[in-house]
Amino acid sequence: MPREEGRKLIAQNKKARHDYSILDTYEVGLVLTGTEVKSLRAGRASLVDGFATVDGGEVWLQHVHIPEYAEGTWTNHAPRRKRKVLMHRAEIDKLIGKTKEGGLTLVPLDLYFKDGKVKATLALAKGKKSYDKRQDLAERDSRREIQKAFGRYVKGRR
């Protein structure tokens, strides 16, 4: 059987970019059981409530929902269990300092297969206030209006 190549998206946390200001991102691996990987290959996962914590010098992904594998037996996994994150020691040490400084959290942005292995993108993020969210929406709308006007101008419709 040929090796899998490329990147295949499993799940994405679109709400994270709305609720948080992303400061830094990290590509990490996950320690998973066999039934979790099979469930992910079926494209089933939810990152909505997910976050990561640093406990005892290790990073753990929590509240990420990977449903039980349909064809699994008594060996099936718990859907919302804590999952260990695989990162370099230097990155973990950097994260320990940044998350203790306050106001910063680790949120998963997406979950994907990269060359046959399950990877996640963790973001070091700061929570947005409601006025920040409104400001971002207004900025995005104004950019969209500018693009529309420019497109009409280029086509000669004014």
Image (cartoon, helix red, strand yellow):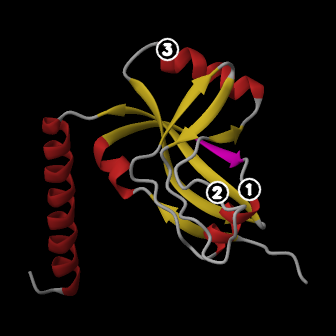
What kind of element bears circle 3? helix
What kind of element bears circle 2? loop
Q: Residue at x 66, y 78 (%)?
A: 71
Residue 100 numbered tag: 3
Mark nearer the viewer, 3 or 1: 1
Q: Quadrant of the C terminus?
A: bottom left
Report crowding for label 1: few under 14, some 14 to 19, many 20 or more residues within 10 A (C-alpha).
Answer: few
What kind of element bears circle 1? loop
- Mark 1 → mark 2, Cα distance in angstroms: 7 Å
User: In this image, 53 relative to 75: left or right?
Assistant: left
Mark nearer the viewer, 3 or 2: 2
Residue 77 numbered tag: 2
Mark 1, residue position: 33
Specify the segment rendered in magenta.
26-30
Report crowding for label 3: few under 14, some 14 to 19, many 20 or more residues within 10 A (C-alpha).
Answer: few
Q: Where is residue 31 drawn, in percent x and y?
A: 73, 47
User: In this image, 89 relative to 9: left or right?
Assistant: right
Which residue is outermost to the left?
158
Residue 89 higher or lower than 33, as above or below: above
User: In this image, 40 relative to 21: left or right?
Assistant: right
Q: Earlier in the sequence, mark 1 or mark 2?
A: 1
- 143 or 120: which is nearer to us? 120
- Main SS of residues in magenta: strand
Q: Earlier in the sequence, mark 3 or mark 1?
A: 1
- 113 or 47: which is nearer to us? 47
Label 2 near label 1: C-beta < 8 Å?
Answer: yes
